[in-house]
Amino acid sequence: MKATGIVRRIDELGRIVIPKEIRRVLRIREGDPIEIFTDEDRVVLKKYARIRELGDYAETYCQALTGALGFSACVTDTESILFSAGSMKKTLLRAPLSSQYVEQMRKKQTILSPEGYRLLENEDTLFRLASVPIIQSGDVNGSVLICSLDERLPLRDTELSILKTAALYLGKQLGE
């Protein structure tokens, strides 16, 4: 845990303000859900990612997509890659997403980029990728994507259609 040197008082309604710099670094926006934990004498705030609840469903879906399409497959929350399968699993798992990718996901945009796309924050690698946001009750919870560095693997509308099905399925699982 990193010390910030920042001390805040709780107001009469029990509220505390998270400093702007911390919100910016952690990508916490107005309206984002925050989980509250206690750990002995500590109160821990964590950005809530409902998509983590999918666990085995998401992991299995990634493996199925990789097996069927030959691409590395991932399920993300709105900040990083949570589940991954395929040849780039070690590189991708838990990697933070680029701000460009996060912005397109939040706008509910699908991505089909056969040329090259900067997927990861702090990394200049350009991936060939297709991505679809996972939406439940109108809110973006994350995305499902396939990606590759191999130019020989075709990336077409067919792969995007398969990802749309995956995103709908995972979104429905969140609703149950």
Image (tube, grey):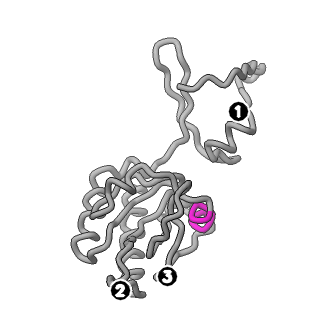
Residue type of the residue flagged with mark 3: Glu
Q: Tag 3 or tag 1, which sits nearer the N-term?
A: 1
User: At which x and y percent is residue 22?
Assistant: 68, 36
Residue annotated with mark 1? 18
Residue annotated with mark 3? 115
Q: Say the numbered circle drawn on residue 154.
A: 2
Q: Residues within 10 Å of mark 1 (few under 14, many from 20)?
A: few
User: At which x and y percent is residue 168?
Assistant: 41, 70
Q: Is residue 162 left or right of residue 143?
A: left
User: At which x and y percent is residue 95?
Assistant: 45, 52
Q: Which residue is located at x 37 percent, y 59 percent? A: 173
Q: Residues within 10 Å of mark 3 (few under 14, many from 20)?
A: few
Q: Is residue 117 above or below residue 161?
A: above
User: Could you tell me how many numbered marks the image carries?
Assistant: 3
Magenta segment, prevailing SS (helix, strand or loop): helix
Q: Residues within 10 Å of mark 2 (few under 14, many from 20)?
A: some
Region of the chain picked out in magenta, as a range: 100-106
Q: Using the image as rendered, state which of residue 135 and residue 97 is in the foreground.
A: 97
Residue type of the residue flagged with mark 1: Ile
Residue type of the residue flagged with mark 2: Pro
Q: Using the image as rendered, state which of residue 58 and residue 87 is in the foreground.
A: 87
Q: Are marks 2 and 1 in contact (CB under 8 Å)?
A: no
